[in-house]
Amino acid sequence: MDWVLGTANLEQNYGLNSNYLTEKHFESILQSEKCSAFFAIDTSPAYGMAEQICNRVVTEPTRIYSKLQFMKSKKTFGHSELKNNELNIILIHNWQDLTSLERVEALSRLDYKKRRGLIAGFGFSTYDEFCDEEILFRFPNLYIQAPINVINQTNHTLMAEIKRGFPNTTMLARSVFLQGLLTKSNKYSALNEHSDILKFKESCRDLKISSTNVAIEFVLRQSFIDGLVLGVNSSSEWIEIKDINLKPRNKVLDCVDWSELQSFDQNLIDPRRWP
């Protein structure tokens, strides 16, 4: 299982979280993962100064997932400040805005870079649109990043089916905490007091298990997931989450019907619809 540190909140507020990850804590996490083969970073030119900070403080060979926009008119990718790195994995950031032909064009260009040894891999980041079998047959080693968590299980079945049919794909779960809603309070009380969120938190109280543990264990129990993209606000929070993985799975959760905790309200599970 890969543990991917998200940088959308690196030195800037992001989504519903009012806190952010400082460069100092970012460096501390890098030091703690210095010898780990299962550590990576997720970044994008859209994430403020994240790329520049990565260039400055990432000194050891590290896999970096870089999300880039495919410029349809120019048939090329947008500018990135990230240093060239043969360990980089490029994900198409505007996948849902592309037609089928444009998706093939974008993936073909990335495939060319990989065959030349310029990048380690490629794929796409999406909310809920994936790809047809033709693309999966043509590019059988795709990296696919999508939201999946205990509240938002809308991609669960499809991602599992893709993994079964195309086992060389790499599935990455993001929005594991739904940008703070599952584990932290936030200023949008209408969302924080949503009936599905309250039901989730009530279940955690009944189980006597923290919401963080439940959110992480749900994803760890999905056999089709190869990696977690996690946004944290401090190095201690990162360590706390990693410690959950080191402990035996909580037997109390073996009897949980996870489908009862999921929401079907798009206004809740889709961050693009949040105020």
Image (cartoon, rainbow, N blue to C red):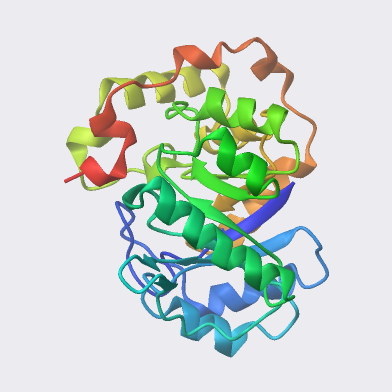
**Rendering coords of residue 265 (x, y %):** 28, 24
Of residues 209 and 101, the one nearer the viewer is 101
At x 64% / y 74%, what residue is drawn? 28
Q: Residue at x 36, y 62 (%)?
A: 19
Closer to the camera, 73 or 146?
73
Can residue 219 be seen by looking at this rendering? Answer: yes
Give above or below for 5 relative to 224. below
Q: Please tell me which residue is depicted at 42% across the width and 46% down the height of the picture.
A: 100
Q: Look at the image and tell me whether residue 232 can be seen.
A: no
Quadrant hosting residue 269: top left
Residue at image location 52% in from the left, 35% down from the top: 132
In the picture provided, is 23 more to the left or to the right than 213?
A: left
Position above or below: 207 against 56: above
Front residue of 265/25: it is 265
In percent of width and height, residue 212 lies at 54, 38
Residue 245 percent coordinates (x, y): 73, 42
> Is residue 108 or residue 151 the one in the foreground?
108
Q: Is residue 79 left or right of residue 226?
A: left
Image height check: is 67 above or below 27? Answer: above
Q: Is residue 261 left or right of residue 112?
A: left
Query: Residue 54: which quarter of the image?
Result: bottom right
| Relative image position of residue 163 (x, y in whole percent) | 68, 33
**How many numbered marks are there?**
0
Q: Going by the picture, which residue comes out furthest to the bottom? A: 56
Left/right of residue 261 with respect to residue 191 in the rendered view? right
